Image (tube, coloured by chain):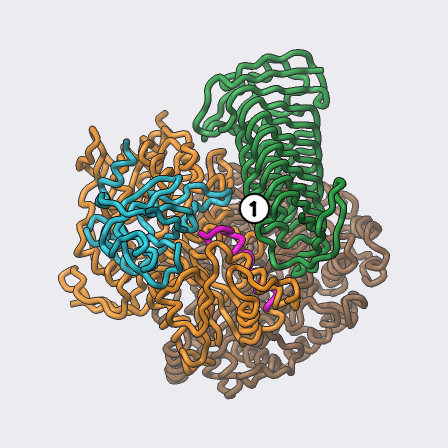
Chain colours: A cyan, B brown, C green, D orange
Amino acid sequence: MKLEANLITGRTAYQGSYLEYKTSPRYFEECAYCELNPEDLSQLGVSEGECLKVSNEHGEVIVRAKMNSGNPRGLAFIPMGPWANAIVDPDTRGCGMPGFKGVPSQIEKSDKEPLDLKSLMRTYCQ
Amino acid sequence: MSELIIKNAAVCDPINGINCEKMDLAVKDGKIVENVSSGADVIDAGGRLTMAGAIDGHTHCAGKINLGRLMSPHDMRMNPVPGLSGLQEPTPYTRAQSGYNTPNTFALGYRYSKLGYTTLSEAAISMLSARHTHEEFESIPILDKWGLTLFGNNWHVMNYVRDEQPEKLAAYIAWGLKASRGFGVKVVNPGGGEAWGWGKNVTSLDDVVADFDVTPRQILMGLAEANEALRLPHSIHVHCNNLGKPGNYETTLETMKLMEGVKTTRDRQALHLAHLQFHSYGGNSWREFESATPQITDYINGADHLTFDMGQVIFGPAMTMTADGPLEYSNARMLHAKWSNKDVELEDGAGVVPIEYSPKSFVNAVQWAIGLELALMVEDPWKVMFTTDSPNGGSFVNYPEAFALLMSAKKRQQIIESLPNLAVDRMVLPGIDRELDFYELAVMTRGIQSKMFSMNNIGHLGVGADADIAVYDIIPDQIDPGTEHEKLKKAFSATSCTIKSGNVVVRDGEIVATPAGRTYWVNASGCVSNDVNEAAMKDIKNNFRRYYTVGIANYMVEDEYLPHPVEITTEVN
Amino acid sequence: MQTVTLTLREKNRIPIEADTISPDNFAGLSERDIEQIPLCLGNTQVFLGDIFEVVADGSDSAENVRIEINGDLSRIKRIGQRMSAGEIVINGNVDMHCGCSMTGGKITINGHADNWVGCEMKGGEITVNGNAKYYVGSGYRGESNGMSGGRIVVNGDVLDYLGEHMCGGEIVVTGNAGLLPGLSNNGGTIVIGGNTTMAAGEMKKGMIVIKGNLEEMLPIYREDGTEEFEGQTYRKFTGDVNVKGKGTLLVK
Amino acid sequence: MKVITDVVCPFCGSLCDDLTVKVEDNVITDIQRACILGHNKIAGVCLHERIESPMIRKDGELVEVTYEEAIEKAADILANSKRTLSYGWASTSCEAVSKAIQLAEETGSLIDSTANVCHGPTVLAVHEKGSPAASLGQVKNRADLVVFWGCNPVHAHPRHMSRYSTYARGFFTKKGRKARNIAVVDVRETDTSKLADKYVQVDPGCDYMLLNAIRSVINENEDVIPAQVAGIPKEEIIELATMLKEARFSCIFYGMGTTQSRSKYKNGDAVSSLLYDLNQYSKSVMIPMRGHYNVTGFGQVANWETGYPNAIDFNRRLAYYNPGETGASDVLLRGEVDSAIIAAADPGAHFAQEAVRCLAKVPMIQIDPYHNATTELADVVIPAAVVGVETEGTAYRMDSIPLRMKKLIDTTFKSDEEIVTDLIEKVREIKGGA
């Protein structure tokens, strides 16, 4: 079961409070998740804390599921940070700004765990 | 420090009554001295025209010009005045340069220096953003600067004027000058800025400013009297109400008359009118628009309490920037142009709008003429300060073009012939054959500034003055400015030599050194009694606590922002 | 007639700024002279001969100069900038600003073009026989006049901001266009063969024809009957009403 | 014990200047009035692990070296590169920015700030239409309508609403929250939208459509608006436009929801155009919700020193500017730089994957107080003092009001400004010798 979703990324106060402490496990907890509408989550058969694979033409990332009834259906939110950025649209559309919001993506349940910061960054060094 | 002697200079120094006399100038420790030792460095001026460093007494060089830059990245590559505009590579002495109307700070310093200017008076410091002005000042190399602080729409000012507390008003101004490290009192569209807080404006000296119950007339009078009570070196510097509107000359006349009653406490004018060109319009609509220079200059020729600057228009692209927020919005609507606005809490505001003055536009052509008319129809050059209100009427790099116009009736006539007939009918310039000489030009670019800002150390070449000197590649008795305008323009565009505080900064039109300039500010607190000051501070602190978004402690510009300060105090010892 | 053939020796990663490659600059120059023309590679200067194999034949004035460039030029910018006459044929992809500010002559790109192709163009003709990216025929930052004359034909797709601030000339795109084509049009003509979206914001004058599907119509146009264009009938819209625009937007 | 008052918070663009900090034995023991973001940043200086020593990557591992070695290595990279990207400079002082620009000019580099992935499009919008703005105090004292468009201050600027906007009490707004209406436009309910009087849920990426529809109402062209635009019924659009038109003073605060969504800078451009129309009827201004506390300051300094606010390319010695070509993300995405110097920002964490891949490939110098994602990719790491806590300097608030950041505690770390000054000197030495 895959959910077609529109991915947006953005700030949260909690992600922000660990901005200068990225090596802390709290930063990981506050960034490596994806918020979905409860109905979307139940459609995927996923409950909060379980893992999701979010993928699109730019890549894929494993994050934990989180519920947010404020999201309309089909809208996925991942806090700004390395996990979100693994799958944003890098094209700057002629004006310098990559596609951090409005990236068509597929979401499915995963039994893999999210990578921690260092492991995630290491994938870029290969 | 080193010694320097400039030999065979044709010195034109109106403050000291010297009119193109061949003489030597001795310089020691950055000052003009009687004589120097035989070991002094020698510059042979070869009979060239030599004046004190020029002073731009009303220019927008720091602060809201940055908003102008932000709005016009395309300005950076504009190059209508080669050598003084556009993108220029760094050299061993200079940083990279950009821009025309809104050049970067480095270009501002270099290009003014090339024109022989050594001091700038920034026309408006917004108090809450004063640090910004001083940061840009510090980034402009070579030149000395000061800035005039905006007071005309300040809540404290309006409250004290309404409540008839002139002493507290003076105390507030002294405090505000210190907070902003400002030099003098700038008044822009008094009352209009506050009205613009609600999207409105005032239209006469007697409109009542909503919520504050004062009129522009009262604000002007209150500030002028406080200015004198504090013995400030400069008079109030006024941008009248109704700038840029047909028929506004009446408001301007009223403003001038209002100040007849002000008793000055220093030997200078009681009122300086900024960019008078924009305030000398006749007609009751744009259709009827015409020059009202005769009405304005008739009055000025009979008055002795005021000075003004021209606000000359230069054809081509310019960038208007002023604290007159409502004016800029109406400019933007009229011109269908980009519009920036910045209202500042409890204080003034600002607006920035690009403009293009076209010789084909009848209005623009008349505007162009009015600036020249004002300078030529006022008999006494000691009332006229040369400006383009850079970059409002046009960039300062065009000053040589405007000098040439003032010095040549023939050149003016050539341009007039290319203007629309309708425009020519609405101006008085075609009938004027006066041509300024070098002496009068030196008055308008150096002498009057020295007097009107009470800056005895600059604007002249007498012993004891700062060694700010410009040598132009002109032999005064071998040129006819009336016919040789290209030669004249070229010489005024790049000095043979500019000396700043005794340092040679320009040689043969090129920058050869970039020492840091100084920043002047006026500390008038000595003219305020302690108890009045304490009472005013109580009000000020109260307003900060309730209405400002920064604390009073974070409002005062710190010493760090003036690494090269010159503090001027005003009390009589 | 003068013909010059440039063949890229090796594909570069750091962009080369090649505003010196134009018929105006090559006219009357020998092979040797052309090899000595400077180009910018990052913060260093290189010579044309270092980057390209140069074969030149004949010597003539700019209008009779034909430059053919072979290779993957996707990191070579500003080819044909400000050219006034003659012809450039590019066999391969080309980087940004190709033909920008040109006033005459002809550029043919047998490959894909990058951003700002024909930007602030005043005259002449550019044909892209592949796709082009962002800001085809538009203006540079802050400038309110983009392309003011000449003609650009893209026989493929283009991306966003096609013809932004255009005030004259003509752009024809055979394929699809990205977001917001024809923004602030002030007198140019744009024909889009395929689909696009949110067209013609702030158009004051000029015409924009969309033969395919206009996916989202900006709520700033008033329908104004129909109009024929190239034998087809289109719904005619006039606007942008918010700038009191008199522009014509033709939509199927 | 030292009590320092009127401390300016070095976290977000709100630049709150009313913090009180207590210091005992050079350790911060108490912070008053800061939000969670500011508190964690200031407290973190003494709590979080710092990069203790300069490091150079050798055989894949960062090993500690002397400061001089690190500077030498860094200068060597810069002096020998053809196209260096200098990036970040937003969480630092204007004085450091000035030095960074000088370094970029002297090395023929390209320099960009974090506006690249934040309010860069806002800057492009100003180029198009200008910036009808006001200081935050105008909003506090006058605004009877505040619109938060695509921004979420509860999370990103936690004290904004109490100090400047929603709850602030001013001269004409003595009743605070009761004196004003709050409207929120967003694609999803947020903690900010929950506090609004009016919440408008726009379809993702359709802000430009909605803004144009509002303009059509303001300009009395309602007839051109279809029954629904951007997922919002026409009646609701008219209601929102009427709120704006009838307000005495309104302010539209806008955030990444406008700059990063589909039509990017055209959203800010359209807000500007809306205000150009609206001010015929009622006073209205716009203020961008800037993120890093001094990203505005970078723009100011760069603008006066180079003529351009960010994305400045000195490759050809002249300043050249063209976001989309000279932005940090642009050049990294195209893989066209051959070295990088990163300071006071973390592109490793905040850039798109393709850009990060390029950063990983080239020699990269990092200047930062903390180990972050970028450190994982860096070849030279130089630790720095935390501006606003360990060193002073100027910062600009989101409304371009400059404030002086204080030094609260002593440190042995060098400031960004000092480090860049040393780098300039070393680069000159290398280039002079060559």
Residue range (magenta): D259-278
Residue B352: image x %, image y %? 58, 60
Q: Number of marks in the image?
A: 1
Q: Chain of mark 1?
A: C
Which sits in the foreground, B298 or D59? Answer: D59
* Residue D263 included in the magenta stretch of the image: yes
Which residue is at the far bottom?
B163
- The residue shown at (37%, 70%) is D194
B414 horizontally vs D319: left or right:
right
- Which residue type carries mark 1? Arg
C198 horizontally vs D70: left or right:
right
Residue A92: image x %, image y %? 46, 43
Main SS type for the magenta part? helix
Which sits in the foreground, C180 or B385? Answer: C180
B260 versus D258 height, above or below: below
Mark 1, other Cα within 10 Å: few <14 / some 14–19 / many ≥20: some
Which residue is at the far left?
D25
Residue B536: image x %, image y %? 41, 82
Which sits in the foreground, C15 or B294? Answer: C15
Residue B99: image x %, image y %? 57, 46
In the picture of the structure, the residue carrying the numbered disc 1 is C141
B347 horizontally vs B209: left or right:
left
C154 versus B380 height, above or below: above
- The residue shown at (60%, 79%) is B216
